[in-house]
Image: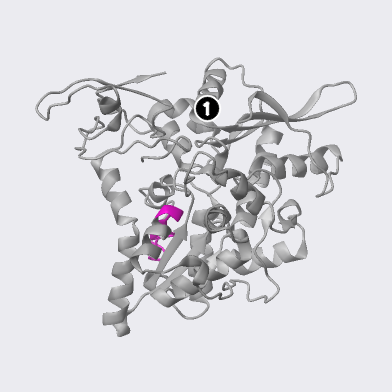
Amino acid sequence: MATSSGFSSALKIADLNDFITPSQACIKPIENNKEIKSNVKTNVNISLSDCLACSGCITSAETVLIEQQSYEELYRIINFNKNNESKRRTIVMSMSLQSIASIAAKHHLDMETTSRKLSDFFHNLGVDYILDISLARHFSIIEAQNEFLDQFNKNEFPVLSSICPGFVCYAEKTHGDLIIPFLSRVKSAQQIMGILVKQFLNDKQINASHVFHITLMPCYDKKLEATRNGTDFSHINADNFKEVDCVLTPIEIEIMLNRENVIFTELNERLLDKITGDPNDQMVSHLGSGSGGYAENIFRFMASKYFEKYYKCEQQLDYKVNRNKDFIDLTLEDESGNKLLSFAIINGFRNIQTLVQRIKRKTCDYQYVEVMACPSGCLNGGAQLRPESVDDMILERVDQLYRSLPITSLALDGQHQEIITLYDKYFPNKNISKLYTTFKAVPKTKNLINIKW
């Protein structure tokens, strides 16, 4: 689970055995000018600012899972289809808005143009359907709102977002039963999109087991999310399909473009496919942060639902920087200054440590926290395209491009007829159990790394 903790650094883990141990090729000891001999075991100090891996390093089992989640796997399926027409698998790609924004920023294009060029590129390779992930985020945010409303009525806080697999893995491996009870059980948009895709193709008489679903995500950790054990993210027993078969990243897209000798800006444009079938359906973003806007959407929902405080979509909320720009508060107070709602957005492991310590000491007064492992959230995910020079302000361009999309408020109104229709279509009889998952503590393995807290 090697991810970037900013623009300038990345930790590469290789040659691992089945225990969580430091790699012989780990760059941290090299930076410290310490000679590591293959037959000598030694402690390695790796701080959380060096690596976003949840408990220091990943196991070889996780490494295998990541390798199976590469663009090479996509090429394997494409080649299989070419040689086995009667047994071909229908290939579907679902693209996150953050990843589209990253590629758009790199090539100085707008979001729509970039999405259409990506559609042309992958259709030419042999992908059958190219979608964006907006629809799945509708469901994820709405269910997160409903879940929080239930917790609010029970007065059980805080609720911690669980759409960041880096944070989830960290919680399961490092803090176990301390943090897991607070994790939201609502699935991420990536996993919900898998359910929608397979249902969409089932309506076209294509069996889910014959579908190969790829997602384009800003983070390497999404590969681990897609391969979680158990039946939460796969439906082998019931429907015989995995929600997500392969996760690609913007960095891998650039590798594929080079491999195909394609100049991205010279590609033709092809409209994205639409699950809803509505030709007016367009790529839309949601209110709030570049990580999906969970905190803001739930905040607005609760403000109107419980306290009759209505915020118009164009009305900016009053965020307050707490410790730094990646630790911000969002509150609703009554006329006497009493807090009615207390939310936060926390990005980066340094700030996550502060949150964990507050939960340990029972001094955390937040009701809901949107948590992301990467500084600046998903727009700066570890697999996003990096700047080509110190003067390249690519993150600012990514943010501007992401926010250039039309904003939808559908997720704020669960009674909107369009939302009701979507639920009736994809989750008839209110069978929404597939939209939820579970988490559990991972037994600690002997760890030879001395992590500095």
Q: Position of residue 250 (x, y in %)?
A: 45, 55
Colour convention? one colour
Q: Is residue 199 visible?
A: no
Q: Nearer the viewer, residue 112 or 284?
A: 112
Residue 315 as seen in the image, left or right of residue 344: right
Q: Residues within 10 Å of mark 1 (few under 14, many from 20)?
A: some
Q: The residue tagged with tag 1: helix, strand or loop?
A: helix
> Outermost residue toward the left?
39
- The C terminus: image quadrant: top left
Query: Is residue 8 within the magenta segment?
Result: no
> Outermost residue toward the right?
335
Is the stretch drawn in magenta largely helix, strand or loop?
loop
Q: Amino acid at mark 1?
A: Ile
Residue ID at (53%, 72%): 200
Q: Position of residue 72 (x, y in %)?
A: 30, 62
Q: Which portion, as a residue range, is magenta?
A: 237-251
- The N terminus: image quadrant: top left
Q: Is residue 240 visible?
A: yes
Q: Position of residue 89 (x, y in %)?
A: 36, 75
46 over 231 or under it: above or below: above
Quarter residue 74 falls in:
bottom left
> Outermost residue toward the bottom?
86
**Residue under pointer 1:** 352
80 over 373 or under it: above or below: below
Q: Nearer the viewer, residue 367 or 256?
A: 256
Residue 133 as seen in the image, left or right of residue 408: left
